[in-house]
Every structure is written in C-alpha cells, then in structure tokens.
Image: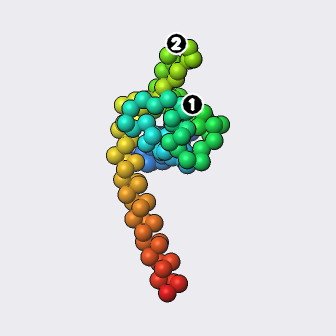
C-alpha cells in the first residue's frame, strides 16, 4: 500500500491511521460511553473510572477535532453541554468490539499461563 500523508504525518497502513483516531488509553472508553446516545460531561466523567478532568477534556477536544463527536451547548441556566458520536465514530464501534473480544481472550490466556506456572 502507498504511504498516506495526513496532518503532516506519514501513515504506513490503514490500521495505523485508524488507531490515530481511536487509539490510546482513553479514546475507546469515551467512544463506548457515548455509544448509546448523547451524554453530559458530568455523566461521562462518572462513567469512565480513573479519568481526570484534564484528560477527559483533552480527549473530548481531540475527538471533536477529528470529527468523531459533536459538542452541543444548550443556552439555558445553568448551561448544559452534551456530547454525541458522529457517524464516523459509530463506524468504529464494530472494530472496538472486536478489539475488546480479542483483549478478553488474551487476558484469559495469560491468566491460564499464570495459573499453570504457579501450580
């Protein structure tokens, strides 16, 4: 496959490019938390254990910039903000589910190996 240049970076495979959109520690949990519809910031923060406010804000901004989510501000008192996945992000859900299944299988295999070594 021919190299792909995007935002002044060279990508050598479609997988590498896709992972630039959904890879990292926090992007997948954010996408999964929004999979069932729009969510307010506080609810999103409560849904994702261990994420800091700074990291959540960073991930939300990055995903919005990449066209993976929308941010809707409701002009009411107090102001309300909701985040929702775009069609682009919805297309990533089957790949994320496959990665989760693969990860669970790897964890089970490693757990078995550890049990065998300690027996």
Q: x%, y% of residue 93?
A: 37, 43
Q: x%, y% of residue 56?
A: 59, 37
Q: x%, y% of residue 29?
A: 49, 45
Res 61 label? 1
Q: Nearer the viewer, residue 25 or 67?
A: 25
The residue carrying pointer 1 sits among few (fewer than 14), some (14 to 19) or many (20 or more) residues within 10 Å by Cα, namely some
On the image, numbered disc 2 is attached to which residue?
A: 75
**13 left or right of 46?**
left
Q: Nearer the viewer, residue 87 or 53?
A: 53
Kind of element beneath mark 1: helix
Residue drawn at 50 percent across, 77 percent down: 114
Residue 101 to residue 95: above or below = below
Q: Residue furthest front?
A: 77
Q: Residue furthest right?
A: 54
Residue drawn at 48 percent across, 80 percent down: 115
Q: Nearer the viewer, residue 45 or 109?
A: 45
Residue 27 appears in the picture as rendered = no
What is the tally of numbered marks visible in this picture? Answer: 2
Kind of element beneath mark 2: loop
The residue carrying pointer 2 sits among few (fewer than 14), some (14 to 19) or many (20 or more) residues within 10 Å by Cα, namely few
* Of labels 2 and 1, the one closer to you: 2
Residue drawn at 57 percent across, 17 percent down: 78
Res 108 label? none
């Amino acid at each position: 496959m021919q190299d792909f240049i995007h935002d002044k970076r060279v990508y050598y495979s479609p997988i590498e490019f896709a992972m630039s959109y959904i890879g990292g520690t926090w992007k997948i949990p954010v996408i999964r938390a929004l999979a069932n519809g729009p969510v307010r910031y506080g609810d999103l923060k409560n849904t994702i254990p261990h994420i800091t406010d700074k990291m959540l804000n960073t991930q939300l901004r990055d995903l919005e910039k990449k066209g993976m989510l929308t941010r809707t501000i409701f002009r009411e008192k107090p102001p309300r903000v909701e985040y929702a996945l775009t069609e682009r992000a919805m297309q990533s859900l089957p790949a994320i589910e496959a990665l989760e299944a693969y990860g669970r299988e790897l964890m089970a295999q490693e757990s078995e190996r550890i049990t065998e070594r300690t027996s």
